[in-house]
């Protein structure tokens, strides 16, 4: 039973590793699509943070004597495709930013769920060092989600009646 859980744990880590690496490629595109300077810099900061998440995962895989490759995270692939759609829409600037924030928050919620799960698995198999590393990433993902919510509230959006001078 524990070997089955460990194998699932490794498979889930590979999935997250794929997700994080897809995100490393997607975040620069999201930053370029952002109109708000705060949102753009938020995406750029999260890119650096995400590179750190990959390094933590590399540490975990090295300790497990496992290779992190061999799996593609289809969930993240779909979320990134939705983000690309949002970036490509012909919305006014502040509306596009809201769409990008929505796409980014869906990504964060996906990651929060994934990291919470693998952290619990790490604890169950007694890999406390990995659990600590995974918890660090989990907390950073939660903070990013909170920052995105704050940005969504700060970016002003004019209604059609406001833009017509009504």
Image (cartoon, rainbow, N blue to C red):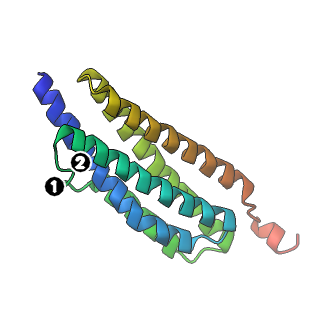
Mark 2: which secondary structure? helix
Q: Residue furthest right?
A: 166
Q: Residues within 10 Å of mark 1 (few under 14, many from 20)?
A: few
Quarter of the image that includes the N terminus: top left
Q: Residues within 10 Å of mark 2 (few under 14, many from 20)?
A: many
In space, the residues marked 2 and 1 are separated at their CA atoms by 7 Å
Q: Residue furthest bottom?
A: 90
Q: Position of residue 27 (x, y in %)?
A: 47, 65
Mark 1: which secondary structure? loop
The quadrant in which residue 113 appears is top left
Tally of numbered discs: 2
The mark found on residue 25 in the picture is none
Q: Circles 2 and 1: CB distance less than 8 Å?
A: yes
Left or right of residue 69, residue 26 in this image? right
Left or right of residue 43, residue 18 in this image? left
Is 64 above or below relative to 120?
A: below
Check disc 2 and report the residue beneath it. Answer: 14
Check disc 1 and report the residue beneath it. Answer: 70
Quarter of the image that includes the C terminus: bottom right
Q: Position of residue 37 (x, y in %)?
A: 68, 68
Q: Position of residue 32 (x, y in %)?
A: 54, 74
Q: Position of residue 136 (x, y in %)?
A: 46, 37
Question: Residue at 47% across / 48% down in the picture?
Answer: 108
Left or right of residue 40, residue 22 in this image? left
Taking depth in this image into account, of 119 and 55 the one nearest to the observer is: 55
Mark sitting earlier along the chain (2/1): 2
The quadrant in which residue 120 appears is top left
Question: Residue at 66% across / 54% down in the picture?
Answer: 152
Question: Residue at 31% across / 34% down in the picture?
Answer: 118
């Amino acid at each position: 039973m524990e070997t089955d859980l460990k194998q699932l744990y490794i498979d889930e880590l590979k999935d997250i590793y794929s997700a994080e690496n897809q995100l490393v490629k997607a975040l620069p595109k999201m930053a370029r699509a952002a109109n708000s300077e705060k949102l753009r810099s938020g995406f750029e900061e999260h890119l650096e943070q995400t590179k750190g998440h990959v390094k933590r995962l590399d540490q975990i895989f090295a300790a497990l004597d496992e290779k992190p490759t061999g799996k593609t995270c289809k969930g993240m692939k779909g979320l990134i495709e939705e983000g690309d759609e949002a970036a490509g829409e012909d919305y006014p600037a502040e509306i596009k930013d809201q769409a990008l924030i929505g796409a980014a928050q869906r990504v964060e919620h996906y990651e929060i769920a994934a990291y919470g799960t693998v952290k619990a698995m790490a604890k169950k198999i007694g890999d406390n060092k990995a659990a600590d590393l995974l918890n660090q990433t989990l907390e950073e993902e939660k903070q990013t989600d909170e920052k995105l919510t704050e940005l969504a509230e700060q970016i002003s959006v004019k209604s059609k009646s406001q833009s017509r001078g009504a």
